[in-house]
Amino acid sequence: MDDTYDLAAHDIGPDIDALRAALAAHGITLPTLGVDPLTLAARTTRPPLVALGNCNVATARRMAEVLRSAAGG
């Protein structure tokens, strides 16, 4: 069985761009947001993972605030 995936069929670039835009709409920037290189290089049928990356404490607090607000809290 061939366990490789078709990169074109699993292009997560548009999803990353959409997430980046949604975060930016709330004043949040994750500088290292992108495709996880290890899962991109892996030979699997699954698409690569999105690497959210590291962020500073202020960004983490802002993300928590936005998520709480979106959840109605």
Image: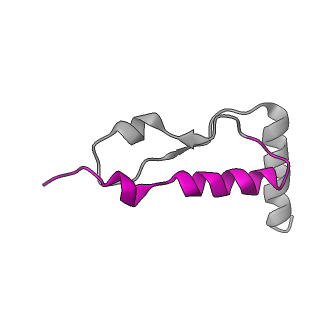
The residue furthest left is 1
Image quarter of residue 69: bottom right
Image quarter of residue 73: bottom right
Relative depth, front residue between 6 and 72 = 6
Question: Which residue does the image show at 84% across and 45% down from the upper left?
Answer: 62
**In the picture shown, does residue 19 fall above or below 54?**
below
User: In the shown orientation, is residue 71 left or right of residue 49?
Assistant: right
User: In the shown orientation, is residue 21 left or right of residue 51?
Assistant: right
User: In the shown orientation, is residue 3 left or right of residue 29?
Assistant: left
Image location of residue 15, percent across then percent down: 57, 57
Image quarter of residue 6: bottom left
Find the magenta span and give its range: 1-29
Number of callouts in the render? Answer: 0
User: In the shown orientation, is residue 31 left or right of residue 63?
Assistant: left
Image location of residue 23, percent across then percent down: 76, 52
Question: Which residue does the image show at 85% across and 48% down from the upper left?
Answer: 27
